[in-house]
């Protein structure tokens, strides 16, 4: 019955590409048609071995200057693709247009393009970067949790959205530089259930990696509670 209904819904509202609006064919994978999918630039080597920053030249991975001078708290950070063009539009529609179904499609998109060198251990805990309750009320959902749930689906990892909390709403980070962001975010997160964090491998999930200050601060707090290691996976990288 449910499948019949879903079929009927697809007939009346066929799934469309979120990039160009074209009706998707049976072999197309939402949220993009093949033409829009081709515009998405996956992040591949050469990358910083630590933070995943892409390099323009060369072909070998190595540490970037920022990670050499100030090593981030996390062990490893990777992003699936660049935050631009159709992917940027899709993420905006997901977050600000409150399109949770699009978010789930973007989560499945993340599972289709695993980042080389980063497999998600079966016993890892997946923690979405938390939103402050005020922001959660405003948006209706935490975009990172929607992505995390899709990421955990194939391997059955535990998604833990209760052990790490955001205790104060920070000023929007958008216009701040790297150092200002780091100061702005300091102390914003708290571990509420330390026993769920200690000795665990943790994968932090978020939608966009910008300077890494938010995930870096989450990692710092988790490691202070004896997390075994903290890796970071985001859908897009600015
Ligand atoms: Zn398209
Ligand atoms: Zn780096």
Image (spheres, rainbow, N blue to C red):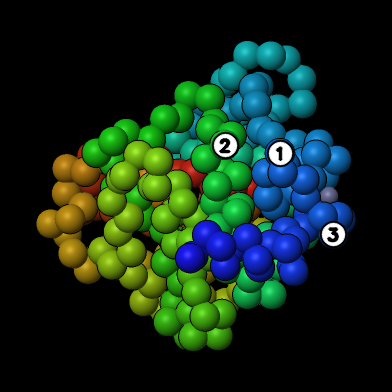
Residue 190 position within the rendered picture, expressed as x and y whole percent measured from the top left? 30, 67
Q: Is residue 27 visible?
A: yes
Residue at disc 3, CB closer than 8 Å to ligand 1: yes
Q: Is residue 228 depicted above or below 167 in this figure?
A: above
Dots 3 and 1: beta carbons under 8 Å?
no
Q: Which of marks 2 and 3 is nearer the N terminus?
A: 3
Residue named by callout 2: 112
Dots 2 and 3: beta carbons under 8 Å?
no
Number of numbered discs on residues: 3
Residue 222 position within the rendered picture, expressed as x and y whole percent measured from the top left? 29, 53
Q: How crowded is mark 3: few (under 14 residues within 10 Å), some or many (20 or more)?
A: few
Q: Which of marks 3 and 1 is nearer the N terminus?
A: 3
- Asked where in the image residue 34 lies, by quadrant, the reply is top right
Residue 107 position within the rendered picture, expressed as x and y whole percent measured from the top left? 54, 51
- Asked where in the image residue 178 lies, by quadrant, the reply is bottom right
Cα distance in 3D space between marks 3 and 1 = 16 Å
Residue shown at the point (42%, 55%) measured from the top left: 149
Residue shown at the point (45%, 30%) measured from the top left: 118
């Amino acid at each position: 019955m449910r499948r019949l209904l879903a079929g009927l819904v697809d007939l009346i509202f066929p799934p469309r590409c979120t990039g160009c609006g074209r009706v998707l064919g049976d072999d197309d994978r939402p949220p993009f048609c093949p033409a829009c999918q081709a515009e998405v630039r996956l992040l591949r080597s050469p990358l910083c071995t630590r933070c995943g920053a892409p390099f323009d030249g060369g072909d070998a991975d190595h540490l970037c200057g920022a990670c050499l001078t100030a090593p981030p708290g996390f062990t490893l950070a990777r992003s699936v693709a660049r935050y631009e063009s159709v992917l940027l539009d899709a993420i905006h529609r997901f977050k600000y247009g409150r399109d949770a179904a699009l978010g789930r499609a973007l989560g499945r998109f993340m599972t289709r393009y695993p980042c080389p060198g980063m497999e998600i251990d079966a016993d890892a805990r997946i923690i979405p970067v938390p939103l402050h309750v005020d922001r959660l009320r405003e948006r209706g959902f935490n975009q990172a949790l929607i992505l995390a749930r899709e990421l955990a689906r194939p391997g059955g990892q535990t998604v833990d959205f209760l052990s790490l909390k955001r205790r104060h709403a920070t000023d929007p980070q958008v216009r701040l530089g790297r150092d200002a962001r780091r100061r702005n975010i300091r102390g914003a997160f708290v571990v509420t259930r330390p026993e769920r964090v200690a000795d665990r491998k943790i994968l932090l999930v978020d939608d966009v990696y910008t300077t890494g200050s938010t995930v870096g601060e989450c990692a710092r707090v988790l490691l202070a509670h004896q997390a075994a290691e903290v890796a970071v996976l985001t859908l897009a990288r600015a």
